[in-house]
Amino acid sequence: MGLFDKIKQAFKKEVKQEDVDEIEKRKDELPNEKINNGITQEELVEKEISQEPLSKNVKSTQAKYTQGLAKTRKTFSQRMNELFANFRRVDEDFFEEVEEALIGADVGFETSMKIAQELRQEVKLKNAKNSAVVQNIIIEKMVNLYEVEGLNEQNELSLKKDELSIFLFVGVNGVGKTTTIGKLANQLKREGKKVILAAADTFRAGAIRQLVVWGERASVEVVTGAEGEDPTAVVYDGIKRAKEEDADVLLVDTAGRLQNKENLMRELAKIKRVITREVPDAPHEVLLVLDATTGQNAMQQAKQFQETTDVTGLVLTKLDGTAKGGIVLAIRSELHLPVKLVGLGEGINDLQVFNPEEFVIGLFKELMQKE
């Protein structure tokens, strides 16, 4: 079953639940006398309910996606409402408005162009004229493109079995990099793994202190150096400590603000050389942390970091606090970088391994229309 089929299935269940609620309301208003065939009116109304069972056990992660994407859904809904407010016919002006609506929803320029082009062909093929049908086709095209671009994508973290795994975290200051490391450390420790943190952002004393606080909160050791110390020395000490303690995972924080791109490239290259010298197949992940609330600015940051280091995956923080969650579609389509982790709340347990299926269901199921 494709992703769009799963969204339709989830949408039908929600519609069915609405129908059940309406029937229950009607039952309260109906008399309970016997009717011609010997059953009560209440029993007759019950027969209107489909025999297909409704799922009551929604996964907690799916609930988090659905709740966390509320602002993004509202943005998409507003864009669709504006698009169809004066809908008269499907023509070239309409397709241009579709492109503008999708760009406004932070889906990205290239992605919006692709979707609009495919929409042209599909609308002609189906001879679609009804606004509900056309809106569902738009959603279908977004979901299908997202699914195709994600074939063979690895969203799970690359944790080594019975060996030390080293994850390098990069990103500009203020995106939630240190907080992400702390939350991930807490989760890995709860899974039974021995975790050590390395505070290699030695340019800011605040960053070192913040990581130490997170280490205390998660009850994991933090290897630190003095402010202004060579970051590679801290990384080396972190690897050495991880080996001595037979740790499972070493999470490395890095500086987010250097004078220019060349300095950043040089610093990250030095850190990676030290890591690879000590553990030849490491780092096992280079995770770029982005603030989802910045939308297209996050896309630009990702492109810049792709030029400076071999990013293996992305962490999107504050996805629950943004109306710009459409950026996830643009990232997959235009950058071809897997999203590995997402922040769906402020709590220590609200950092989630990214699930593409739960993301698209949470984003689109409530935007589907009855045809």
Image (cartoon, rainbow, N blue to C red):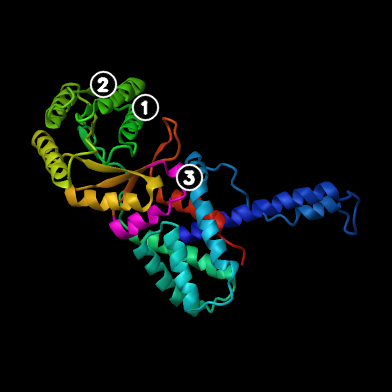
Q: Which residues are magenta?
A: 317-336
Q: Amino acid at mark 1?
A: Arg
Amino acid carrying mark 3 in the image: Tyr
Q: Amino acid at mark 2?
A: Glu
Considering the image in quadrants, where does the C terminus appear? bottom right
**Helix, strand or loop for disc 1:** helix
Q: Residue at x 47, y 41 (%)?
A: 61
Relative to 245, residue 361 above or below: below
Residue 359 visible within the image: yes
The percent coordinates of residue 64 (x first, y second) are 49, 41
Left or right for 146, reference 226:
right
Residue 352 x, y percent position in the rendering? 40, 39
Badge 2 density bin: few <14, some 14–19, many ≥20, Cα 10 Å: some
* Label 3: element kind: helix
Circle 2 sits on which residue? Answer: 221
Q: CA distance from mark 3 to mark 1?
A: 22 Å
Magenta stretch, main secondary structure, is helix
Crowding at mark 1 (Cα within 10 Å: few <14, some 14-19, many 20+): few
In the picture of the structure, the residue carrying the numbered disc 1 is: 190
